[in-house]
Amino acid sequence: MNEPAMQAKLPGNALTTEELKLAQLMVSVLNLEIQAAEIDPTAPLFGDGLGLDSIDVLEVALAISKTYGVKLRSDDEHNQKIFNSLRSLNEHVQQQRGK
Amino acid sequence: MAAIPLIRNFDPGAVFAFRNRRPIRVEEFLGEVRRLADLLPDRRFVVNLCSDRYQFTVGLCAALLRRQVNLLPPNVTPDLLKRLSLEYPDAYCLSDGEVQPPLQIETFLYQPAGNTVSASVPHIPEEQIAVIGFTSGSTGQPTPNPKSWGALAKSGLAEFERLGVAAHGNMSVLGTVPQQHSYGLESTVLMVMQGGLAMHAGRPFFPSDICAELEALPRPRGLVTTPVHLRVLLAEASELPAVDFLLCATAPLSPQLAIEAETRFAAPLHEIYGCTEAGQIAARRPTQTQEWSTLPGVSLHADEKGTWVRGHVDREVLLADVIELRGRNTFLLHGRTADLVNIAGKRTSLSHLNFHLNSVEGVRDGAFVMPEEDDGTVTRLLAFVVAPGLASETIMLALRQRIDPAFLPRPLCFVESLPRNETGKLSRVAVEDLVTRLAAKVG
């Protein structure tokens, strides 16, 4: 049996509606084991957080393009920060949508 | 001893590379190689971590001039680097500052200067050991695969000839693949050096960036990529820039994807097949035929163990895939033998992964499983583990130190015991049963 997720949800880590939608997209596209609502939006996406790798980033980029019409680029100003967390990724997507 | 020039088919004023949208001429490249060669520390082994393709190539050539051997590890996990630094205590890292070099190995930071030129092409002895590629063994210790400069140069030239690249003049090559891996080294570095082509120094990732960089290259231009990248590129980009040449490798490409790629890029698509141990072996044009044809200088023969290849590597290698020979130089590829795993083009073996899983403290027994793949997104490995009292995150953390992230299990399942038979093996049926029960629980 699986170990349950051990993160406690603090108020600052609650998902906004938009973040939840993006989380659901990622869980669905990547077949992640975690429930979307359980994802800490401030936790790292790579490595020790959600554990994504570069293959996942490509799939997520494609899903974001199809769902939000936003095409991710490497030379966006704050690129290093975009994939830091679900929150930063969502902020970027919402900002690009507005353009 | 015979020597082979570092580069062929060039005149000094021709473009060797495009870096940050700026052309770098052959004479500038040669000047830079000699300049760097003079600066390198006096060691026998170098781990070239340069992510810039041009800087990597300058580093590779400078090392050859100094008779240093380039170590090419398949990943940079802490465990692997630790093993390498123990095996090659004389090794240093060459870095361009983009990738964080490992702390336990001395690093030489390479900044291009571009203010020296040279018109003379160095020749390197054929038998000089140029690189050592590493493959994952079942003991955790990586297996070295040394390659001579002669083998590399001939392989690069053979690929250039076999793929008909000469028809495209001095084509500019853009790759989405790392130059530290066999495919990238052969197809974006060696083929360029020996074929008189020009390389794009970057490695664009997102489809929009790939398209933009292709657009910025002069014609003729070619794209060297993988099925994962090609699929996403075709799916995301509405308009694709015209190219003159497409190359795809590391995993099987579906026929539908091959046809779509040729149509939308308006260019012939070739696939190439090889492995770290043997180098590039064969190629085909998938929209025209299923059959692979060996590269010039490569020959195959089969016996009861499987299919052996002899070619540009200096010894015979047993291929790990199931090969059906159709003629002396043609064959069909039927997929992996049972132990091999290929995730999005990265290869390893189940026994290698199981070795690492079972080395984690607290794990009593563990086994990775490769489920049946569907045609959609990348299928990931599962792992079953008997580890009472251990948290999932503890095991994942330990695995991350030891294996490439692409192979991390999704999911990692805790079980009371693994259904091994009397000889300690997990039968195929037992494994399928485990997977079915897991699916029933989750679904």
Image (cartoon, helix red, strand yellow):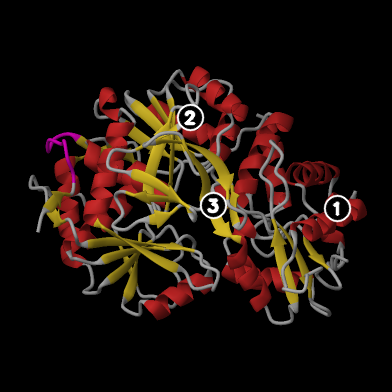
Q: Which mark is residue B436?
A: 1
Disc 2 is placed on an element classified as: helix
Disc 3 is placed on an element classified as: strand
Q: Is B308 on the left or on the right of B115, as rendered?
A: right
Chain under disc 3: B
Q: CA distance from mark 3 to mark 2?
A: 24 Å
Residue at 58% over, 67% down? B352
Single out the mark in the foreground, 3 or 2.
Answer: 3
Q: CA distance from mark 1 to mark 2?
A: 42 Å
* Residue closer to the observer: B353 or B170: B353
For disc 2, the marked residue is B211
Q: Which residues are magenta?
A: B7-14
Q: Quadrant of the N terminus of chain A?
A: bottom right
Residue type at mark 2: give it.
Cys
Q: What is the chief secondary structure element of the magenta stretch?
A: loop
Single out the mark in the foreground, 1 or 2.
Answer: 1
Residue B176 percent across, percent down from the top left: 46, 41
For residue B365, what is the image quadrant?
Answer: bottom right
Q: Residues within 10 Å of mark 2 (few under 14, many from 20)?
A: some
Disc 1 is placed on an element classified as: helix
For disc 3, the marked residue is B346
Number of numbered discs: 3
Residue type at mark 1: give it.
Thr
* Residue closer to the observer: B342 or B230: B342
Residue B135 percent across, percent down from the top left: 46, 62
